[in-house]
Structure formats: C-alpha cells, structure tokens
Image (cartoon, grey):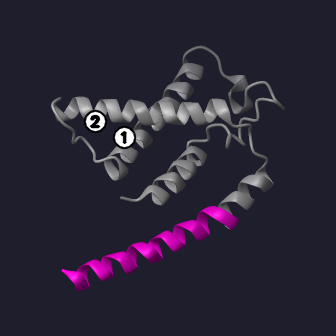
Amino acid sequence: LQPIAFIVYLIAATAELNRAPFDLAEGEQEIVAGPFTEYSGMRYALFYLAEYTNMFATSALTVTLFLGGASGPILPSWIWFILKTYVVVLLLMLIRWTFPRFRLDHMMSLNWKYLIPISLINILFTGIGIKIFQLVS
C-alpha cells in the first residue's frame, strides 16, 4: 500500500501527459491551440487520438502498479481492469478541469521542492519497512 507514491505518481503522470494544469507546451490562453494550430482534419484528430491513447496507457499502468491490477470480486478480471482504468482516466480529467494552469517556474518549484523530496523520503521509509518486516518474520 503506497498512497504517497500513488499521489506523487499521479502528479508526475499528469505532467508527463502534458495535460492541464501542466500543459506548458500548448498554452491555450496565449496562443490559439498551441503546436496544433497548423493542423486540421485527420492530422489534428491523430494528435488528439495519440494524446488520449497515452492517457489510457498511463491509466492502465497506474491500475497495474497501485490499484491491484485486474483483481476484484464477482466480476471477471478484465472487467475490473477496464473499470479501474476508466476511474483513473476520470480522475485525470477531473484534475484537468479543476486546477488552473501552472507557470513554468511554479511547476519546477513544485517538482524540485516537494515531489522529489517526498519521493525520496517515501523510498527510504519503504526500505526501512521492508527491512523491519524481514526481521520480524
């Protein structure tokens, strides 16, 4: 059970997906649609298809790493996996709709001052917990 790692991973995955509030490349407030301004038709659709495919792949990885994968009661395992993946996708969309866009300096400050130290402390405590568990059992 790693709730701290889950939260840090979700924030980092949102930034890696280039989704709001970390969509620094697009900057829809400053320019029309970011780098997608020159595209239309099928090329434009393929960019968004790739973006959402990346979001589903990241959500599937999140389910596998943190939410028990395809395990669950009563229903077949593949249904559980799809349901959990869609819940994570909805969570990523909720993050996008809720938070305003960060400036670059605020994002770097968040990453370097908070996420990396929290991650390192979490790794340290996880290692200590594993050692204690090995000594007890």
Indicate which disc, 2 or 1, sits on the residue closer to the N terminus. 1
Q: Tell me the quarter of the image containing the C terminus.
A: bottom left
Q: Tell me the quarter of the image containing the N terminus.
A: bottom left
Q: Is residue 6 visible?
A: yes
Point out the stretch of residues depicted in magenta: 113-137
Tag 2 and tag 1, C-beta contact below 8 Å: yes
Q: Name the residue located 46 percent from the left edge and 53 percent from the top edge.
A: 6
Where 5 falls versus 76 (above or below)?
below
What residue sits right under mark 2 in the picture? 81
**Residue neighbourhood size for the residue with mark 2, other residues' Cα within 10 Å, grouped as few (<14), some (14–19), many (≥20):** many
Q: Name the residue located 79 percent from the left edge and 47 percent from the top edge.
A: 103
Q: Tell me residue 79's x, y (percent).
A: 24, 29
Amino acid at circle 1: Ala
State whether the magenta stretch is mostly helix, strand or loop.
helix
Amino acid at circle 2: Phe
What residue sits right under mark 1 in the picture? 60
The residue sitting at the top extreme is 41
User: In the picture provided, is 40 more to the left or to the right than 128?
Assistant: right
Q: Nearer the viewer, residue 106 or 118?
A: 118
Where 82 falls versus 107 (above or below)?
above
User: In the picture provided, is 29 more to the left or to the right than 74?
Assistant: right
Residue 129 forms part of the magenta stretch? yes
Under circle 2, the secondary element is: helix
Under circle 1, the secondary element is: helix
Q: Tell me residue 133's x, y (percent).
A: 27, 78
User: In the picture provided, is 75 more to the left or to the right than 99?
Assistant: left
Estimate the spatial distance between the alpha carbons at disc 2 and disc 1, rounded to whole Å. Answer: 8 Å
